[in-house]
Structures are given as C-alpha cells and as structure tokens.
Amino acid sequence: LEKKLTNQELIGCKAAIHSLTRSQFIDKIGNEYILTDRGFSDVQLKYYALNEITNLRISIMNKQL
C-alpha cells in the first residue's frame, strides 16, 4: 500500500496514525494497529449517531410521500 501512495499522502497517513495513537484510539501490537477500547467506543458511538440520523432522514422522506 505504501508504494501506491504519494509522498504527501504517506506523510498524512503517518501523521494520522501518530495522532490516533497519542489520543489512545489505536495501539500498535507488533506490526499491526488495533482499536483500543476507547477507539472502539468512539467508533461505536459515531456509528450509532449516523444510524439515528439516517433513520430520521428516512422517516422525514416517508412523511413527505
């Protein structure tokens, strides 16, 4: 994957990984990155919120029909 990225994209990815690691959303074990409990909780909360927004949009569209 790294070979397909431009130098600027690679720098951006490394910066994002560093930021996520510092904020304790991901952790590195060996050569792999995993979501921490905090990271999983944040993703789960955002997914739930996105799902609620989608359901609200569907409900509004159904009422307009």
Image (spheres, grey):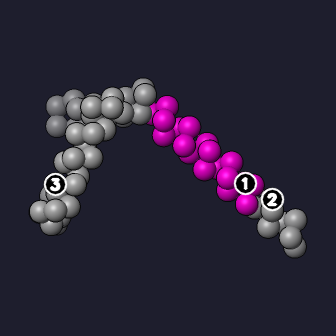
Mark nearest the camera among 3 and 1 is: 3
Residues at discs 3 and 2 in contact (Cβ within 8 Å): no
Q: Which residue is mark 2?
A: 59
Query: In the image, residue 38 lies at what x, y percent?
Result: 43, 28
Q: Which SS type dominates the magenta stretch?
A: helix
Q: Report which quarter residue 17 is drawn in.
A: top left
Q: Is residue 1 above or below residue 32?
A: below
Residue 12 locus on image (x, y percent): 22, 54
**Measured Cα–Cα span from mark 3 to mark 1:** 37 Å
Q: Amino acid at mark 1?
A: Asn
Density class for disc 3 (Cα within 10 Å; few <14, some 14-19, many ≥20) is few
**Residue, disc 3:** 11
Please report the residue visible at 62 percent of the width from the left and 45 percent of the height from the top. 49
Is residue 4 toward the left or the right of residue 44 in the image?
A: left
The quarter of the image holding the C terminus is bottom right
Q: Residue at x 23, y 32 (%)?
A: 28
In the drawing, does residue 8 fall left or right of residue 33? left
> Secondary structure beneath disc 1?
helix
The residue under label 1 is: 55
Asked whether residue 25 appears in the rendered view, the answer is yes
Label 2 crowd bin: few (<14), some (14–19), many (20+), radius 10 Å = few
Is residue 51 highlighted in magenta? yes
In this rendering, is residue 36 above or below 58?
above
Residues drawn in magenta = 40-57
